[in-house]
Amino acid sequence: MLDVGGIFLPHVGGRLWHFNRLPLLVTGDPGTGKTTLAWSVASELGLGEVLEFHTRSDHRARDVLYEMNHLLRFYHAQVHDERATKPENYIRWNALGCAILSPTTRLVLIDEIDKAPRDFPNDLLDEIDQMKFDVPELDGRKFEAVERPVVIITSNSERQLPDPFLRRCVFHRIEFPDATRLHDILFERLGHLDLSERLAKAAVARFEQLRALPGLEKRPSTGELIAWVKVLRATGVDSAALESISRLADLPGPSALVKTERDARLLASAGTTA
């Protein structure tokens, strides 16, 4: 397996997943490093800068490949600008399109695909399988990859992805960091705040107790932990104060940790930390 930042990527039939030409679908809780994994893989494999596509709810599958600025072309046609005669002047190649056009192997990150409309993943199947596409706006001109891109797709599992799409992916789940890794993350991200070992240890312990609280609607991620420790430092809360808390409801700076009204009410009624 390929060891990337302590994460071991799966083999497929005895070979690394990307040698089997399948996209890698990475899932896990928010803040587990799904997006940064792509950069680690690109660095490990010497693939250069990651070509990123951050999925929105209004995206179509074609948008991963390219976008056409029809409005600008229409404007130029109205003012008799010669550029309007060439539709290629109005194309912007996006992540997968750039990778297919590249003469070298590139890594494409399609981030948070579960945010897209339901048809989005299935509409990408042929392009991901064959690594070629056509552009109707260029009279159907076809483009095919010289070197097959490496594709990593992330999902927060907010909704189920279509079965045909899942069958064409290698699946890998990143588990939420344990206490040791959370401690390391705090010092990696907040080392400039001169954190003490004792405060970091106490913050991680309380954070894990909160995440274990039954009934949470949205369990806090590493992003919330980092923001919370910043709040603790800014407000002068020390390790002794955190260690002495007997009820989760008494945690300082709770608004940095819980982000829904339901979770705020749940925390306010939480019992002892023991």
Image (tube, rainbow, N blue to C red):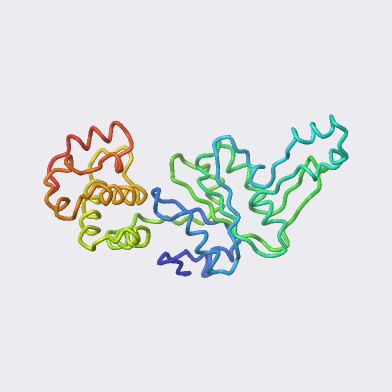
Q: Residue at x 63, y 51 (%)?
A: 95
- Please tell me whether residue 151 is drawn above or below residue 224 in the rendered image: below
- Please tell me whether residue 121 is drawn above or below residue 50 in the rendered image: above
Residue ranking furthest to the top: 78
Q: Nearer the viewer, residue 52 or 144?
A: 52
- Residue 125 rendering spot, x and y as whole percentages: 63, 47
- Residue 147 rendering spot, x and y as whole percentages: 69, 63
**Is 46 left, or right, of 181 in this rendering?**
right
**Is 170 left, or right, of 138 in this rendering?**
left
- Residue 13 rendering spot, x and y as whole percentages: 52, 67
- Please tell me whether residue 46 is drawn above or below residue 211 in the rendered image: below
- Residue 220 rendering spot, x and y as whole percentages: 32, 45
Query: What is the number of callouts on the image?
Result: 0
Location of residue 253 by image quarter:
top left
**Is 28 left, or right, of 123 in this rendering?**
left
Q: Nearer the viewer, residue 126 or 256?
A: 256
